Amino acid sequence: MSGVADRVLARCDELAGLSSMADGICRVYLSEQHRVANELVAGWMRAAGLDVCFDAVGNVCGRLGNPALPTLIVGSHLDTIPDAGRYDGILGVLLGIELAERFRDEPLPFALEVIGFGEEEGVRFGTTLMTSRALAGTWDHQWFDLCDADGVSLHDAMERFGLNPAETASAARDTGGLLGFLEVHIEQGPVLEAEGLPLALVTSIAGARRFEARVQGMAGHAGTMPMAMRRDALAAASEIVLAIEAIAASSKDGLVATVGQIEALPGGVNVVPGAAVFSLDVRAGEDHVRDVAIDEIRARADAICERRNVLFDMQQTHIAGSAACDAGLLAHLAAGLEANGVVQHRMASGAGHDAMAMAELCPVAMLFVRCADGISHHPEESISPADVAVAFDVLCSSVRSCAESFKE
Amino acid sequence: MSGVADRVLARCDELAGLSSMADGICRVYLSEQHRVANELVAGWMRAAGLDVCFDAVGNVCGRLGNPALPTLIVGSHLDTIPDAGRYDGILGVLLGIELAERFRDEPLPFALEVIGFGEEEGVRFGTTLMTSRALAGTWDHQWFDLCDADGVSLHDAMERFGLNPAETASAARDTGGLLGFLEVHIEQGPVLEAEGLPLALVTSIAGARRFEARVQGMAGHAGTMPMAMRRDALAAASEIVLAIEAIAASSKDGLVATVGQIEALPGGVNVVPGAAVFSLDVRAGEDHVRDVAIDEIRARADAICERRNVLFDMQQTHIAGSAACDAGLLAHLAAGLEANGVVQHRMASGAGHDAMAMAELCPVAMLFVRCADGISHHPEESISPADVAVAFDVLCSSVRSCAESFKE
């Protein structure tokens, strides 16, 4: 069905034009571009035969089928980071619309709902997954006071968008009526390309823990402090960075650990560093794998610093639990892959997704689509029409598999 | 002679009061504090029986003995960094004055000149050792265009100080009439304290080479980039930092190598570093020792980066040759140590000193005085009266040893 893939890609291009940047894509939550994107997507939903509504937090929702039936939600997000690619999030919404249109005249034993979430990236107010959390009933009223770079609060931004902040609770869904949430998303990593596969089943969405680590040594003059008497904080930190890398690399469970920021203090070219601070981000599909690794990192860092006669401290700055995908939904996705002759590759998602928030509401599952060179969050983000086509076919087959299960 | 030590320390305290900072010591070249310090030191010189002059670059010079005789210069600098200690440089000037006073009525076969240099630290105009370079005849006329933080050029600052920039060449000395330059200075490091010794003979002043090193890897998403596929620039840089430390630590020649600055790029907590930049400062008493080490560092870094499939580049940003101290002058200092029962400890100076510039003019030698905890360039800089007293006695004995050599 290259017609479907072509239309999806053309719509991705059209949405890419709705940007606050002159030379790049940027579409943040509750912006004018968000409003126009919602209207555009709503039009495509209506054309696909969906009943459209806009919920209390700015999501666009299109429903196919009897509202009294249990509902399978399909979707992802419509917002972007600054200078974004054109497929991150959007692909999942547009494939959801195509899916619904495909089943427009093919009655299902459940309703289909397609959602374009308004806020996943956390760009404008610094908090991610806000609008999927609204559906999950985990919206935090303290968010209303969060301000964007221009000092506009979330509360005021909602009002300017035409939303009533007092009604956000109405966006929350009732667990009872939901079959689950399916999210198709580009992988945003290089694994599928390396494996030569178009798609992957996501078994879980990793929860990250982040830390700020600090090594306290003793500063000294680069010329007058003999090597043997140094308590060089950066040398100790360097040894810890390598220990972190080794611990993650030796894991068999898809663990990733990253030191993305580092600073030596006082930071003079001719001063032996008296302190070093660095960030640590650790993720795994299963929380206990991640937590065991963090304990090992801490123990190795303590040993390194004790040997070097410097002090080590590591403070947690962020924690999110991993979200396991539902075995039942995964089985339907697996059936969809099989029906289309696609090799089944299972992997954890290292990045966060709306499905992570939705997992607090209902069963979730995700399908990853291969992207070129693993590039995402960048204008060069790219996917192939063939991969979009097979993703669509697998999605259709998976929904049929789900429908079949109702007959049993 | 605790009287001499007490007076020297009291004068250090008095000079510490001449500061542009309210709560700390700061006295930069050609400042009002410099002028007042010069007058104060000139007064002490006159009281010690010296003929005083101010040279064309703002140094204060005091002479004892027949100007036709060969001259031994003793001295150091009077300027400070911001929030400085009170002994760095100053001690050597004040001990020179005491030395001259001691020989006021004890004729020597040579003249003694005490110099308080105006500029060693490089704080105001970013270039160090300017005023000793003026004596050595290596003043650079391009310096006139250097500006301080307020945009005042060196040229204008000299005029405001009452100096004529056109006359700087007159500060240069004639090599022929000089026996040498002796500089007493606090060690600014922890070696003498660790050795339990008050003094050291400085065999050479290390010349530093500095580099900016860059590792170019590939940025990636901290969650979606598997460990095995990463080209993490910071991990590579960390391995290089440890290689640098190991190469310097294994040197038997007093080599020191320091990475004082490091940055990971783009610098996101959730981004695998695509690049890492760091500084490198390498020093040794002998240039070939330093240069061999740098070649080894470069080779090790290249090997590390090749194995990790990242690129390495290292650009030199600074080079200074080491300055060897004169064997003849060192022999007189050694005789001075022996005459006072002080164990002879020889070491290279890792920090730069006026003697480094003066070495281009005449034989030089230095005597290091122990300082507490190796602390310097800090308000807590501290020396003991006993060490000052023994430094003075050794200086006197050394000058007598030098005088004896004239009789042979």
Image: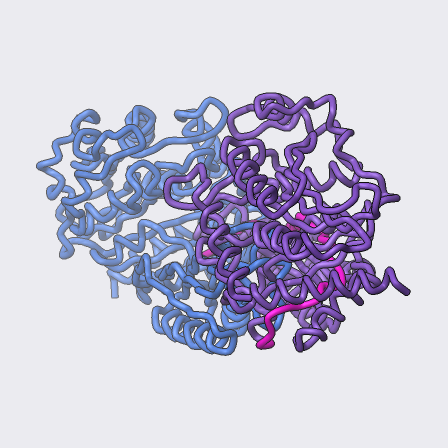
Chain colours: A blue, B purple
Pick the front one: A406 or B66: B66
Is the residue A376 above or below the residue A394 in the image? above
Taking the image as shown, residue A21 lies to the left or right of residue A61, namely right
Outermost residue on the left side: it is A166
Taking the image as shown, residue A122 lies to the left or right of residue B194, namely left
Q: Is residue B312 within the magenta segment? A: no
Number of marks drawn:
0
Q: Is residue B196 within the magenta segment? A: yes
Residue at 13% x, 47% y is A68
- Residue A27 position by quadrant: top left
Residue at 11% x, 43% y is A169
Residue at 82% x, 52% y is B179
Is the residue A23 above or below the residue A195 in the image? above
Pick the front one: B286 or B226: B286
Q: What stretch is highlighted in magenta?
A: B195-222
Taking the image as shown, residue A368 lies to the left or right of residue B296, namely left
Pick the front one: B134 or B292: B134
Find residue B314 and report its horizontal and vertical position in percent.
71, 50
| Residue A337 appears in the rendering | yes
Find residue A253 and report its horizontal and vertical position in percent.
46, 71
| Residue A325 appears in the rendering | no
Is the residue A42 above or below the residue B107 in the image? above
Find residue B405 and report its horizontal and vertical position in percent.
85, 63
- Residue B139 position by quadrant: top right
Find residue A144 and report its horizontal and vertical position in percent.
17, 39
Label the magenta part by its dominant secondary structure. strand
Q: Where does the C terminus of chain A fall, quadrant-wise?
A: bottom left
